[in-house]
Image (tube, rainbow, N blue to C red):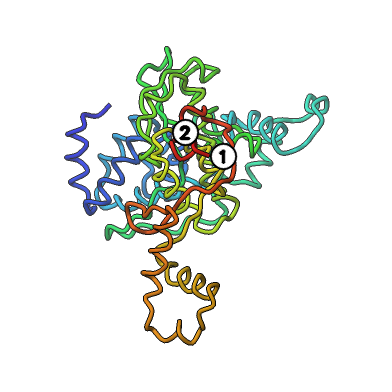
Amino acid sequence: MMDIQKKRDLLMSLPLMEQEQRWIMERLDTLSVKEQYQLSAAILRTGKLEELAGKTGWELETAILHMDPEVAVDAVNCLLSLEDYQICFPAGSYAQLGSFYLRHESHLPERAMYYADLEALGRRYEDRHPGLFVGNCYVEYPEHPSAPRCTGQGLIPEDDGWSMKVKLASSAVPEGVWLRLPDYSAMTDRPDEVALALDELKTRSLENCMLLDVRCSLPELGNLMEQYDSALELVNDGSDLGYVLDEQGQGMPHFMERFAAALEFEHCRDLRLALDISQNLHCYEWVPRDGLKDFGRRKLLEAGVSEELLDSGCIDLEGYGADLLEEAGYVLTADESAYITRNNLEFLRDWSAPEEAGLSMEQQ
């Protein structure tokens, strides 16, 4: 692996602003196995970064950092487009691609598969889904070229399409590899992040893997390396967190704001408890700071105050609303964006043990 100071020196030589330099270093440091395959395909498709195509792991990282500075922005845009590239695995040949198609998309009875021309099916798949073979994968190009999202002016979109990045090692690959969660194999019936990582680690089960490092999109959840001894359990819970963040409470308004406020209210520093809180947001009453005026107005209307008086501007509705909430036991969040309290609804647990719950739950 490249020396960290050398890497920083190389990044500083690229025509990127400081924010972009930090962003690309983090992305390169935590590229998952799947992302390495996707990046190779994205690079080859641009026609500008051919020297990087086919490289994975530290070879890819080193090559990107040594490339001509004039194409640095193109490299960033490749990193921003990875989710547009679909992976077929295992599919390192036309015959394997044909087998992949039969198993995951054709619904052909298993008995009939023995009579299929796998290579012909693989070439047919390629015609319908243009892409290229990289290692033991076939990477499908997006239907339309990805629009550039980085202009070189320091405005890189947030890399927020993940819940957790986990670095795992095996006896065969002690230096380890990254995987990016959630893993969508159960939803798509296609091998995803975990399968690709296990293949790279030359092992068949997460139970044979050791945890080396973890990055969580919710850093307030604390040190996950201390919370988990099992790579399997951490990856499963990390994927569950990803599904939670994707679903956004099945369309619940202000889901992330409510979730963050509840985590803070319960002083949550545990992933399992956080997962339970995400499924029990109905157990919390939440009022945004910018809704105080409407809250105070509604309560006064319920008390019989006329709309004419309320519209006169002579009553501080926002202050009155805040006073009512504080009297009722609501707590203002640290960023002062909302008030929150616990109600009397039952809090159900699927992940955490009762002793992990905060005081506010124990009293219910």
Please determine whether, in this image, residue 349 is positioned above or below residue 319: above
Residues at marks 2 and 1 touching, judged by CB atoms closer than 8 Å: yes
CA–CA distance between discs 2 and 1?
Answer: 10 Å
Horizontal placement of 159 versus 133: left or right? Answer: left
Residue 359 x/y as whole percent: 43, 36
Horizontal placement of 74 versus 110: left or right? Answer: left
Residue depicted at x 45% and y 85%: 309
- The residue indicated by pointer 2 is 357
Residue 240 x/y as whole percent: 54, 36
Report the quarter where the N terminus lies: top left
Residue 126 x/y as whole percent: 63, 42
Give neighbour class at mark 1: few <14, some 14-19, many 20+ (Cα, 10 Å): some
Residue depicted at x 56% and y 42%: 279
Residue depicted at x 28% and y 41%: 25
Residue furthest to the front in view is: 304
Give neighbour class at mark 2: few <14, some 14-19, many 20+ (Cα, 10 Å): many
Please determine whether, in this image, residue 227 is positioned above or below residue 108: above
Q: Which amino acid type is shown beneath numbered disc 2?
A: Ala
Please determine whether, in this image, residue 292 is positioned above or below residue 168: below
Q: Which amino acid type is shown beneath numbered disc 1?
A: Phe
> Of marks 2 and 1, which one's residue comes earlier in the chain?
1
Q: Which mark is residue 347?
A: 1
Q: Secondary structure at mark 2?
A: loop
Residue 328 vs residue 155, the one in the foreground:
328
Horizontal placement of 162 versus 61: left or right? Answer: right
Q: Quadrant of residue 114?
A: top right
